[in-house]
Every structure is written in structure tokens, then in C-alpha cells.
Image (cartoon, helix red, strand yellow):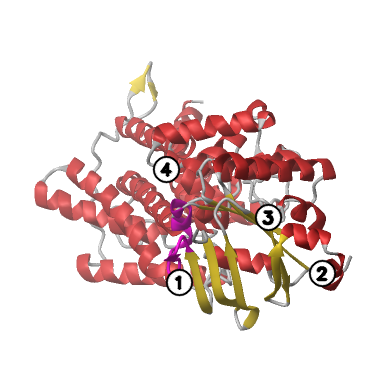
Amino acid sequence: MTDLLTADALAAGYGPVPVLHGVDLSVAPGTIAAVIGANGAGKTTLLRTLSGMLRPTAGRILLDGEDLRGTPVEQLVRRGVAHVPEGRGVIGEFTVEENLRLGALWRRDRADAARALDEVYQLFEPLARRRRHLGHQLSGGERQMLALGRALVSRPRLLLLDEPSLGLAPRVVAQTMALLRQLRDDTGLTVLLVEQNVRSALAVADQGVVMSLGRVALAAPADRLRDDAELRHAYLGF
Amino acid sequence: MDRFLFLTLDGLSRGAVYAAFALALVLIWRAGRIVNFAQGAMAVAAAYVAYSVTAATGSYWLGFVAALIAGLLLGAVVDVAVMRLVDHRSPLNPVIVALGLVLLIHAVLGMVYGNEYLPAQAPFSRTALTVGGLAVLSPYDLFVFAAVGVVGAALVWIFTRTAIGLRMRAAAFAPEVSRLLGVNVSGMLTLGWALASGVGALAGMLVIPTELGLHPHAMDLVFVSAFTAAVVGGLDSPPGAVVGGLGVGLLLSYVSGYAGGDLIPLAVLVLLLAVLLLRPGGLFAPVAARRV
């Protein structure tokens, strides 16, 4: 089976400051990959480069075998990639409904877009109750639901998630991770997840990718990273 | 009392034009954080297009429609060909470029049409109708109210009810997130410029026949008044622009009626200074600190 997402010797940075030094990565369809690593390892930069917000200085990104270089950011969602950015990107001035509608605006199939919206409301009942509330009135957990829901209305093949656990109660983090697993099993969604919270990330992931100083230090099955104490000590420090 | 009523209605009619013009400034401010100092010159350019079309066809209304279209196009061109190329890291850059644009537009209009006042036709009588012996509004005033009302309602409808309005607001509030959700952010900015410049052209068409006539500098004082109105209302607030516009119109009407028309430029500047000193965010500014 070909990989859904492949990064091949990917390099990128901010202005003259290089951050990624040749990242190789592949994610099989219908799996969850967790990118873990210390602050400054380049995790967020990797996601921003994958979704085109940062232009790679070298290397290739393949989505289902097709080169993504030169694809404008706003076209990526049409190729089936949804990116929930750092801080979730809920628009505080918009209502819940407007945030969700925005995620489906690009879709030509209006009927299916409306169906996707209904499904999100079923999946996240609190959102249905707070349709008319503004984004900045929501709790952290509700924002998380809104950010995920807004990504899901585009019916993505690949979901890029930047630190979904950030600032959330452990119970909400656990719910989020369980939801990702459910989506993977039920819909075949592929997820690339960037996390500081190594334990929760590895609990749900199929593959663990340890980043260090802008490189992939280790890519291994998540259960091996979880269970092999030696590997864990060496790469994760616990 | 009659005089007060007359000045009030006259002030509201002028104020409606200021409101439209201030709304145009607010539209661009919200879309791209730029105060478009070239708005007045762009509106005059559109009014000259109307003049040419009306002269060629003999129809005021064809000229009117041509001005609105010219306004929309000019706004889009200014964004794509000028503003997009400006480095926005310093907020002063677009301001300086806009001022340069003012000089350019004034010079080109002067070369093509000359620097004399050209007659500007009003489509309706400007003689006030009398109701029970009181001089109230002229048919032209009613036209001004109707035109500004329709445009205001159309803008509200676009921004709150349509998909394109949702995109435009999203692009303004959260450009990066919007791009991730498939919104063509730079296209929305261009559309914002086009809409704003179209509204500005309308305001120019409405106000120029009430002044000395068509001249490259015809909108200079109107721009200052409308800019004051926008600042009074808070540059971020469309309702603020409307209230500010009407307020400035009333104030200037009273000043000119009771103290003399010569004092109008002074009154505008005093008001602008007072607002900037006392409440620089405008009367309608949210209390929250500036977004970073």
C-alpha cells in the first residue's frame, strides 16, 4: 500500500534561520502518526511546511504520490488535507455556526456539506447547543470540538493536528484521543498529530515519530516506543 | 426653529454622504488595516468617468452606473497593482503610498480634464419642498438618503448573510486560518478594496453636485470630514461610521448655519483633534485592547 503522506528530505525555516534539516516521514492511510519531541524540535514547523504555510527550501512532499510543491495553501483543503493549527484557530468573532460553515464553504456539493455539518453537530452535542455563541465565549474543550468539527466538515483524508492537548484538562485530552481513534477506525481517516503530551499521543498512535533538532531521530511503531523501556529512555527521557 | 429644522435635515443629508464615505474607509481598514488616504481622489476619478459617459450619452444615469463600476474596478486595481506590492510591516508605508496615489490621480485628472470646475449635474431638483410653510428636504436629499440606505443595507446583507461576506470577514479576522479552510484571502482583500471604492464613488457622485462642481480636488474636504466621521465612530465599526457620518454632517451644518460656512474646515479639524485626544479608539471602539 502506498503511503498517503510522504516527506522526503524536507528542509524549511523562517527567513535565514533553518529549522528542519531534511525530514523523512511517511504515514500510511488509515493510521495515526504522532510526532513527538522537545520544544524547538521543529514539530510545528513540520506541520506548517506540510500544509504549505511555509515554503520548503529543499525536499519534497507527496500526498498520495502527488507532489504538493507549488500548491497554494487554500487549495490544500480541496486535496483532502485539513490542518488544525497551533492554538486551534477558532475565530472568536464568529459564532460556532459561522466557524463551521466557513470550513465547508469551498465545497461544491452543498447537500453533502450540509450533511457533514449535521454530522459534526451529532458528534459534538455541546456545539449544537451553542450554535449562536461566539467563538471567544467557548470553553477550551468546546473550542477543541469546534476546531476538530470545522476540520471534519471538509471530509479530509488527512488531518494535521498541532498540539490538540494544549491547555486542556486530562479528561478532555483523553476524549479527543479516543475520538481520533474512532474516526480512524470508522472512516479511515489518516492523522498526523504533533504532541508534547507523549503518553496520550502514543496511546492512540500507530506510529511514533521522534523529532530532535529539526530531524527525525526515530520512527517506530507506537507500541514499541511505549513498551520498550530502553528505547523510551534513549529517545523520550522517561 | 424653522432654521434649526432646515439645518438639521440638511446636515443629515450631508451626513448620509459622509457616512457612506466613512463606511468605505472602514471597509478597507477592516479588510487590510490600511487607512486609504487615496479614497477621495479615487472617488473623484470615478466621478470624472461619469462626467465623460454622461457627456457622450446624454444620460445622467448611465454616467452614474459607470461611476460605480469605475469605482469598483479602480479599487481592485489599486489593491492588485499598488497596495499588494507595498511592504506592510510598517503601517506608514501604505499611508505614504496612498498619498502618492492622491498626487498621481490629481495630476492625471488635471492633465486629462483640466483644473477648472466642470458643471456637475444633479438628477433631481435641489430646491427644498415645503410642508406646511416649512422648507424641508429637497427631492435630491431624498435621493441621497435612499441611495445611502440601499448601499448600507446591501453591505449589511453581503457581510452577514452571504458566503462571500463570511469569507471576507474571515479573511480579515484570521487570514492564516482562512487560507487553511480554503479561502482565497488575497482575493477577498481585493474584493474589499473594490467594494469600498465603489461605495466611495457613490458618495462622490452624491456630494459633488452639492458643492462647487467637478474638480480634481473636489473631494478633499469631504475626505477630511468623512475620515473624521470614521475616527469618531471608531475605524473598526461600520455602525460607528454611519453614526459618525451623520453626527459630523449635523455639526458642520450647524456650524455653517449659525457661525458661517468659512468655519467648516476649522470645525472638522477641531472635532478630529478632540476625538483623537480624548478617545482615540473612537466612540464605538470595543474596550478590549488591540489584537496582536
A197 within the magenta span:
no
Q: Are marks 2 and 4 in contact (CB under 8 Å)?
A: no
What span is in magenta?
A63-79
> Please, which chain is the residue tagged with disc 4 on?
A
What residue do we see at 51% from left, 38% from top?
A101
Residue B209 versus residue A28 in the image, above or below: above
Q: Earlier in the sequence, mark 2 or mark 3?
A: 3
Residues beneath discs 2 and 1 located on the same chain:
no
Instruction: Say which of B252 and A113 sits in front.
Output: A113
Same chain? Circles 2 and 4: yes
Q: Nearer the viewer, mark 2 or mark 4?
A: 2
The quarter of the picture where the C terminus of chain A appears is: bottom right
Q: Amino acid at mark 4?
A: Arg
The Cα–Cα distance between marks 1 and 4, rounded to whole angstroms, is 38 Å
Q: Nearer the viewer, mark 1 or mark 4?
A: 4
Mark 3 vs 4, N-terminal side: 4
Image position of A182 with respect to B175: above or below: above
Asked if the residue under mark 3 is in contact with the one under mark 1, i.e. CB atoms within 8 Å, the reply is: no
Q: On what subunit does the disc labeled 1 rest? A: B
Label 3 resides on the chain identified as A
